[in-house]
Image (cartoon, coloured by chain):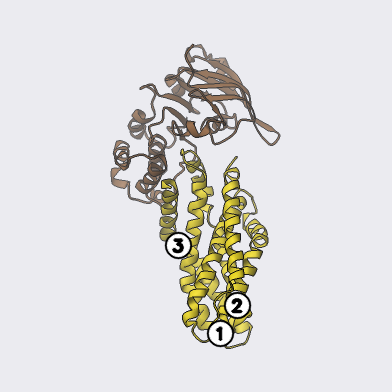
Amino acid sequence: MSATLAVLRKDLRLELRTFETLPAMVLFSLSTFVIFHFALARTTISGQLAAGVLTVTLLFAALLGAGRLFVAEREQGGFDAFLLAPVDRNALLLAKATAMFVFLVVLEVIAVPAFGLLLLGPPLGPRLAGLVAVIALADVALSVIGTLVSAIAIHTRARDMISPIIGLPLLLPALIATARAAAPVLAHRSAASPPGKWLLILALYDVVFALLSYAVFDFLLED
Amino acid sequence: MDQPAIELRGLTRRFGERAALADVSVRLPVGATLAVLGRNGAGKSTLLRILATLLRPHSGRVSVLGQPLPRAAYAVRARVGLLAHEPLLYRDLSGRENLDYHARLHGVAPERVQRLLEAVGMGARADDPVRSLSRGLVQRLAVCRAVLHEPIVLLLDEPGANLDPQAAELIEPLVGGGNGRTCVLTSHDPSAAMERADLVLGLRDGRASFVLPPAEVTEPQLRKLYA
């Protein structure tokens, strides 16, 4: 656990010092909402359309962030330095996924209110808790799969292309479940909480990919 | 017969079709220093990376401190220190932050970081970002990183690179032999490397041209190695 904390602390410190990842994710999300605002030519959206816009935007912003997760490790010898230490290699997976989760939470603290302001119309009020639950489960999927995909892509020459090519199909079920779970919450004049079925699917997806990543990550670091 | 610190038997490592190391055999006693000589691309760095557990051998047997690699890599890592070509430091962190990070990974007390920084004359620049330091100062930090966990086996790829004589003197107690420490060092300066070595491995195109004590290495052998 101390190795995980050491890597996480180092990653957050590097981000605070360089601001290479988070500002890009935030700017991308805000720009996308502005584009949707004008492209859809509607003052407000709701329900399935709103859920789709929010989910797709967060997904692409997450892929943008995931693409940067291992860049410092690759370019500055961080992989070798980590592999020289007598620690469990999955500590790197856990730390990177946690860092990604933190980035996503910070992104959403800014992007979700902006989404509400630009596209949603009436405030969510008590439905906000339901949306937070859906997004939190989606963030776990984005973090775990984003880290896994980034660890695969970083060893390839075309890493900027590989991340979305592998990541999007893997994230498709999570994307569907997130959009379906968020749709009733984002519907106007609705008091609905997210459907339990989709939340359960999302949670199961998180668990399955967390276990899968844990099982294969060690091999991704082999020479 | 005593167990050697490092034993290679028929070590081979390929990169695609090219053999970076082919059928290399060496036996290095505990506390001894091995100088690995050869031209660029001879396989020196590959050998160090295999001993550091960063690369797998493709055939042959490798053991470090009696532990077979890559099977016992986890046990070996805590006892091996690698000073590589690259400093393995994050450019946007300070020297102290980098060493603190490595100290945590290796379970080393933070006080050792300060002691090492002072030992290499980096006390005043320890909080500057690595990207703002000269190559010589970065090399001093890289030495600190390599010896942070007090390894028994030191793998040194050009340890004197970018260092002025005064800095070389400062790092000598950290990377020199003695105290039962086993060293494997590569160098493009054969005479300086052989001065420190107990055994010399000459590599040419990945193959061992000779494995001899320094006194037995002849001038024609060295010339052929670098020809």
Q: Chain of mark 3?
A: A
Label 1 or label 3, whichever comes before in sequence order: 3
Dot 3: element: loop
Question: Is residue B224 visible to us here?
Answer: no
Give the percent coordinates (x, y) of residue B180.
38, 21
User: At numbered mark 1, what does the secondary structure look like: helix, strand or loop?
Assistant: loop
Residue A16, located in which quarter of the rendered image?
bottom left
- The chain ID associated with circle 2 is A
Kindly indicate the quadrant of the structure image that contains residue A146. bottom right
Residue A183 shows which numbered tag?
2
Q: Which residue is mark 3?
A: A19
Sequence-earlier tag: 1 or 2: 2
Residue A28, placed above or below residue B20: below
Q: Amino acid at mark 3?
A: Phe
Mark 3: few, some, or many residues within 10 Å (few <14, many ≥20)? few
Q: What numbered label is drawn on residue A190?
A: 1
